[in-house]
Image (cartoon, coloured by chain):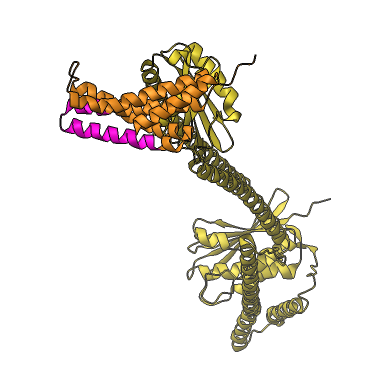
Amino acid sequence: MSSFLRRRLQLQLLLILVAALSVAALSALLIWDSIQNAENAVIADMGRQLSAALGELGHQYSDRVNSDSTWTTLPASTQDVSLRAVSQAVLRSYPGVEGGYYANSQFLGYSFPTHDNPAAKTDVPSAERSVIQEVANRAGSNGKAEQLLRGGNELVLILATTLPERGVVAWGMQRRSREPASAGRRVLLVGLVIAALLSVGGTLQMGIALRRGVARIQDGLGSMEKDFAYRLPTGIDELGEISRSINRMALMRGRLEEELRREDRLRAIGRTVAGIAHEIRNPLNGIRLSIQLLEQRLKRGSVQPEDLDGVISEVDRMDALLNDLLAFKEKKQFVLSEQNLLPVIEKCVHLVQPQEGIGKIRIEAGDPGLRARIDSQRLTQALMNLLLNAVEATQNHDEVKVKLYETNQAVTIEVHDSGPGLDEEQRKHLFEAFYTTKPNGTGLGLAVSRELVEEMGGKLRYENGSPGAMFTIELPAVLNA
Amino acid sequence: MLIAVARRNLDKAEEKAHANDLFVADRLVAASDAFIHAAEHPLHLEEGPKGPRPDAEEIASHLERVYFRLQQADFFARTVGDDNAKQLPGMARKFYERSLQAYDKSDWLGADEFAKSADDTIRGLENLAQAATPPPSRPR
């Protein structure tokens, strides 16, 4: 995704670059075309003026020649004087146009009456003389000829047309500065090219900077994933501002996490305290029940020394629990030994059974000699949890059933109750520490039980019974040698 | 004045002819001839029309040509460079203006004669200009 986004950014930058270049190229073409059009318009106007001037020159030449019967006898220099007067009178009406006649390879009647200093302009301009001659000769052959000269700052158009009088050509020349119209556009063109170059350069620079900046942020975020204390390098640009924002966000997140951790610790302490209370309450219940039983038997006068065994056993269990808590940081040492399971079950049932208001706890043992490697204290603790839960879930006088049997190299203890069972949500969190559905529960019983069973190499599972709930302790069976 | 100018140019022409400068002499004679004709045309008005009567269209066309010729007069006068010659364009313009006035009054004869005077004056001036710029002599 990020790769696509990076490419998309690159594509966008490329598109911007192409667009900038296209706009620059199109604008340049447009301006160039405009310059050309403007110049073409100027040239067309020059052509129109020259054509009109040559028409008038031709007309007046004919008038002059036809009004003088001696014209052809006059020498060229004399004709030149008269024709100068004619061309001056004609070209006075055509600003910027100079010209005259060309006959027998000679220029006649040249004038430039609208020149700033017409008296000084007495002869054909030397710079264009040969071109004019060439154009006049072409006109002599073709009837009409023209030549456009493009100088750096001026346009020069030369036009020549043959006259009805044999061998005589009228010619005219006009020069126009390319300023100011074209110059303005040229400045615009140059400005546009510079702007386009700056735009392209700017886009490239921006693209490179953006790409580097994005890569820097990506690398920084990668480093931050590995080490949350890492902070992105910041610059003075907008990306630097983004980096600073990310750093601020990371700092705030760190503080929040620290606060959450502190709250979690406090909550955990509360849960631990509740768990300890739960673990102490169970043996206390057992002691209380045993003492109540002892009290009844004392009244009947049938007290037996064994009646105190249960109390002593539960006191030992509390002692063991406290030892475990004191040695919390150390790994619990399990004392596993191969033992018969039925007495352990009977002992648990014996401790729970005498509670008032509960139904019968029935033990079904297919093989009373089933053995497993267990820590009897830990198994008692786990089984007691299951039995107390079952008794609590079972309605008065309903039966709780404990089954003991062997399957496929495992010994299984099932605890069935006839209560309402567990719904989906309860099943999902059943073995999580401190999860409870009871108003006074700590949520540690099943979590601890599962841990105890697993420490003995077994498994503690839940299944929906029919009806009620069914917990299964599965312990590895002892293989007979 | 035109007669005086003509006479002076005839004298010059004679001198040039004696000096074997025949081209200049020819141009000066042509100029004198033109000035004399220019001076003669107003006299025709007193004599009355002799030939076919010119129509207005012809006179208008002639006046147009004379107007164009008037624009050449100053160039010719500058080329001659003579003080007397400098007065001739003014004289030609006066003939042209009188022709226009006559034309406006539908005096076709007057318009025609004064137009011819103007035209001849400029032609004389042109001849003087031609005389002032002789062709280079041929190498012998």
Query: Is A209 located above or below residue B88 in the figure?
Result: below
* Chain coloured orange here: B
Query: Is A69 located above or below residue A197 in the figure?
Result: above
Where's residue A361, x and y in %? 57, 67
Residue at image x 66%, y 53%? A209
Where's residue A20, x and y in %? 55, 44
Classify residue A289 as left or right of residue A99: right
Residue A114: name its quadrant.
Answer: top left
Where's residue A261, x and y in %? 65, 73
Q: Is residue A396 magenta?
A: no
Segment colored magenta:
B87-114
Residue A266: name its quadrant.
Answer: bottom right
* Chain coloured yellow here: A
Classify residue A30 as left or right of residue A297: left
Q: Is residue A57 visible?
A: no
Where's residue A350, x and y in %? 64, 72
Q: Nearer the viewer, residue A369 or B78?
A: B78
Residue at image x 47%, y 32%? B80
Query: Is A56 located above or below residue A374 in the figure?
Result: above
